[in-house]
């Protein structure tokens, strides 16, 4: 019996055989898609985390910038108080004051602290003369006031006295629209005010560097009113100011850019760039002394994928390949199981067919034996005659069986069937029997029926006909009448005279009834005086391999 569990398992795996290479590839695609989805989920979570972190960094950087502005404004307020409380402040006093507050002047990202009085243009010449006579002999306001200009704010003091700062002395800041606008806003606000993006006087003649200034107005009491004495101010290089503010936040792996009022290449004040791949950016507006700045921060990544995503992708690729390899092994095993199943099925089919064929042939043989036995019994005179006749006829069946067995029950040559039945009468005196005819193959059942007929004719010739005398001869010839029909001609000569029998014998009944019925053709049997003649027609079936009978359902 075929293992039913194996049969069920292989049948369930039949789908493997339709796509033997497609299924491992499909498994690889599924595993790869799972890995891709996992990487996408990790990247999405990483983007969300980095977005939150970027917003936190923006808040931290904005706070650092405003803190630096506040620290510098505090220093300017202290300077404003100094000039507001004293009628005159000498250069020595201001230098000492500025050094006490700012040290070397680079504190909080500024270039120092300065003083610029607000002078009416009508009194500018008198003001210049006073400074020249007090020791600043080369003090000349530059640029000269434009027609219609009412005030000038020349820089008188600027600490520390570095070379760039000395270059800025006597510069009239009110002559520049951006600076004058900031000073007017400071007066109106009665507090600090920052300029937009400007180029500092300290940087003249050098590559353009963006800068800005913060002004703190100084008021003097005049009767019941207040007048503006001038401005305490601090100049800033924007890049230096950003570097100072960066000391207050911890993340240096992001891009930071500061723009004046709006984001544009021409309004860029300062920037810091980190290494890596550019990521998303966010912006925030902050107020610096009444001037709007836009702070922009951008994320920087070390690679296109995060570290966790790269690890997941690497091990996912390995897992996908392993799944594909396992799938290939499974489909290969399934294919082998299917081959085994098909072999077992074919063997079972062959066994069943052989059993049915054997059953069919045994039934046919037994039917022939029973028919022969019945006819022999009716024609026998005693038990010995019955035994001899029955034994001889069964041996004739056995001889034909032997021929068919040699050909695996595929077919039997007509000449071989004739010669096997006449073999006992050909030993030692072969010239008594002559056979001739082409090679013709007969089906198993037809060969057995022909064998019985030849056996009966040969037995009759041996007892009463040509083979009972030395001079007797038997001629057996055969030929094809058509592709599907052959004729055998039996003819005797030289034997005793032949007459029509007075009663029908078993052999005659066997030939004219049983054999004729099996061969589905009439038998022409004649008892001529010169010898018996018989013509048999045998069907010739298409030559083919032995085909097992299948059950019809």
Image (cartoon, rainbow, N blue to C red):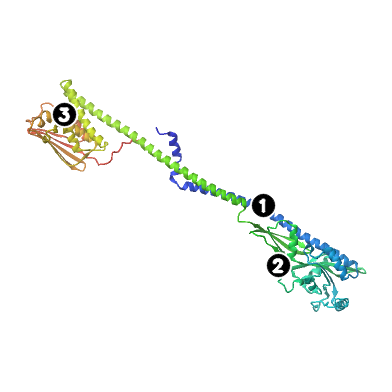
Q: Which one is in front, 122 or 505?
A: 122
Q: Quadrant of residue 346?
A: top left
- Relative to 476, say whether 285 is above or below: below
Quadrant into which the N terminus falls: top left
- Across and down, in percent, residue 479 comes to 16, 41
Per the image, label 1 sits on a secondary structure element best described as: helix
Cα gap from disc 1 to disc 3, whole angstroms: 109 Å
Residue beneath the point at 57% across and 48% down: 315
* Foreground disc of the pair 3, 2: 2
Determine which residue is flagged by label 2: 267
Q: Where is residue 318? Give x, y as percent.
A: 54, 48
Instruction: Find residue 196 and report its horizontal and vertical position in percent.
Output: 75, 68
Label 1 crowd (10 A; few <14 / some 14-19 / many >=20): few
Which residue was labeled with disc 3? 507
202 and 408: which one is in front? 202
At mark 2, the secondary structure is: helix
Does 392 sit above or below residue 198?
Answer: above
Up the image or down, 536 lies above or below 192; here it is: above
Q: Nearer the viewer, residue 178 or 127?
A: 127
Q: Which residue is mark 1?
A: 49
Q: Which image quarter is the C terminus in? A: top left
Looking at marks 1 and 3 on the same chain, the residue that comes earlier in the sequence is marked by 1
Q: Earlier in the sequence, mark 2 or mark 1?
A: 1
- Residue 519, quarter of picture: top left
SS label for mark 3: helix
Mark identifier at residue 339: none
- Drawn side of residue 301 relative to residue 66, left or right: left
**N-term mark: 3 or 2:** 2
Relative placement, left or right, of 453 versus 183 is left
Q: Are marks 3 and 2 in contact (CB under 8 Å)?
A: no
């Amino acid at each position: 019996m075929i293992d039913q569990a194996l049969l069920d398992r292989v049948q369930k795996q039949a789908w493997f055989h339709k796509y033997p290479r497609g299924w491992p590839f499909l498994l690889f695609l599924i595993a790869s898609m799972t890995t891709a989805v996992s990487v996408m989920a990790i990247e999405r979570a990483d983007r969300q985390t980095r977005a939150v972190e970027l917003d936190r960094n923006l808040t931290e950087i904005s706070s650092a910038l405003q803190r630096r502005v506040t620290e510098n404004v505090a220093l300017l307020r202290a300077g404003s108080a100094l000039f507001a409380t004293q009628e005159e402040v000498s250069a020595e006093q201001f230098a000492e004051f500025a050094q006490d507050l700012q040290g070397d002047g680079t504190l909080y990202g500024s270039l120092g602290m300065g003083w610029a009085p607000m002078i009416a243009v009508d009194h500018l010449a008198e003001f210049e003369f006073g400074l020249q006579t007090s020791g600043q002999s080369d003090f000349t306001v530059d640029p000269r006031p434009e027609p219609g200009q009412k005030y000038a704010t020349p820089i008188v003091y600027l600490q520390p006295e570095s070379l760039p700062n000395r270059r800025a002395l006597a510069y009239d800041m009110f002559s520049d629209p951006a600076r004058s606008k900031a000073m007017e806003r400071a007066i109106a606000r009665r507090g600090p005010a920052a300029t937009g993006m400007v180029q500092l006087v300290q940087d003249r003649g050098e590559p353009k560097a963006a800068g800005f200034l913060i002004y703190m107005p100084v008021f003097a009491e005049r009767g019941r009113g207040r007048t503006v004495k001038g401005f305490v101010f601090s100049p800033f290089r924007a890049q230096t100011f950003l570097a100072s503010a960066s000391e207050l936040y911890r993340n240096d792996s992001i891009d930071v850019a500061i723009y004046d009022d709006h984001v544009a290449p021409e309004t860029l004040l300062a920037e810091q760039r980190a290494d890596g791949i550019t990521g998303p950016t966010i912006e925030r507006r902050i107020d610096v002394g009444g001037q709007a700045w836009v702070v922009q921060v951008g994320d920087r990544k070390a690679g296109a994928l995060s570290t966790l995503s790269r690890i997941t992708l690497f091990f996912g690729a390995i897992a996908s390949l392993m799944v594909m390899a396992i799938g290939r092994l499974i489909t290969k095993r399934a294919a082998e199981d299917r081959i085994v199943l098909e072999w077992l099925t074919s063997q079972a089919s062959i066994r069943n067919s052989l059993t049915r064929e054997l059953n069919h042939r045994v039934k046919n043989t037994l039917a022939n034996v029973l028919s022969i036995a019945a006819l022999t019994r009716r024609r026998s005179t005693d038990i010995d005659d019955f035994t001899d006749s029955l034994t001889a006829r069964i041996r004739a069946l056995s001889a034909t069986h032997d021929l068919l067995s040699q050909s695996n029950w595929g077919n039997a040559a007509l000449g071989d069937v004739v010669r096997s039945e006449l073999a006992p009468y050909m030993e030692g005196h072969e010239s008594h029997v002559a056979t001739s005819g082409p090679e013709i193959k007969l089906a198993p059942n037809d060969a057995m029926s022909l064998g019985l007929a030849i056996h009966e004719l040969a037995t009759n010739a041996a007892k009463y006909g040509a083979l009972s005398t030395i001079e007797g001869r038997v001629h057996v010839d055969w030929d094809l009448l058509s592709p599907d029909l052959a004729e055998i001609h039996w003819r005797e000569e030289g034997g005793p005279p032949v007459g029509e029998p007075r009663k029908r014998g078993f052999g005659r009944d066997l030939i004219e009834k049983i054999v004729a019925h099996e061969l589905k053709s009439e038998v022409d049997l004649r008892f001529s005086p010169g010898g018996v003649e018989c013509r048999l027609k045998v069907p010739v079936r298409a030559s083919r391999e032995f085909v097992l009978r299948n059950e019809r359902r």
